[in-house]
Amino acid sequence: MDRRTFLKAGTSLLAAASGGALAYEPVRYPPSDQVRLDPDFTRLDPQAEGAARDLVWGKSFFVFEELERLHGPGAMARYFRTKRELLQPGRSGYTMDDCVAVWSRAVGEDLFGWFRALAFDVQAERTDLWP
């Protein structure tokens, strides 16, 4: 999915979340240097110190849209349901490794490699939620 298609999809996601129509015009920010350096979301880790807000949010929406596209409608709902089932009250912390483990369980597929291909620093060995 190219950036233009992604931005259009992101607007569609926002419209769907708000009942079918945006009540406002999305704010347009000039792209940061990081976005210019990572146009296909495969080079920069959005968790890295100093990551630009547009990279963090842009890559997050891209991930949500792609997981819904790849694993069908309701993939995000399955993620949240699985997260509620797996996490016990009083758990101290929730890392990106934990997040990918939950996503993987929710869709029935190991997604660590997929997230690493998008430059996320994630490892299955750093979470107690996988396999």
Image: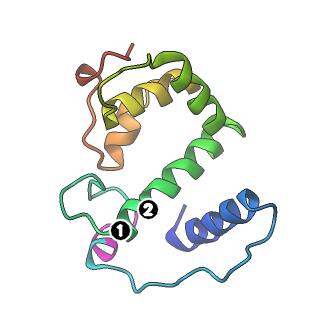
Instruction: Classify mark 2: helix, strand or loop.
Output: helix
Residue 50: percent from the left, percent from the top? 20, 64
Residue 86: percent from the left, percent from the top? 48, 17
- Contact between marks 2 and 1 (CB within 8 A): the answer is yes
In reply to whether residue 16 is colored magenta, the answer given is: no
Name the amino acid type tagged 2.
Answer: Trp
Name the amino acid type tagged 1.
Answer: Arg
Point 56% across, 65% down: residue: 6
Residue 107: percent from the left, percent from the top? 57, 26
Task: Specify whether 59 is left or right of 8.
Answer: left
Residue under circle 1? 53
Q: Which residue occupies the foreground of this view, 56 or 1? A: 56
Instruction: Classify mark 1: helix, strand or loop.
Output: helix
Point 49% across, 30% down: residue: 103
Which residue is farthest front? Answer: 90
Q: Which residue occupies the foreground of this view, 104 or 19? A: 19
Q: Is residue 71 visible?
A: no
Point 55% across, 23% down: residue: 84
Task: Specify whether 100 is left or right of 66.
Answer: left
Question: Which stretch is magenta?
Answer: 35-40
Disc ID at residue 57: 2
Which residue is farthest right? Answer: 20
Disc ID at residue 17: none
Q: Label 1: few (<14), some or many (≥20) within 10 Å?
A: some
Label count reads 2
Residue 25: percent from the left, percent from the top? 65, 83
Q: Label 2: few (<14), some or many (≥20) within 10 Å?
A: few
Image quarter (top left, top right, bottom left or bottom right) of the N terminus: bottom right
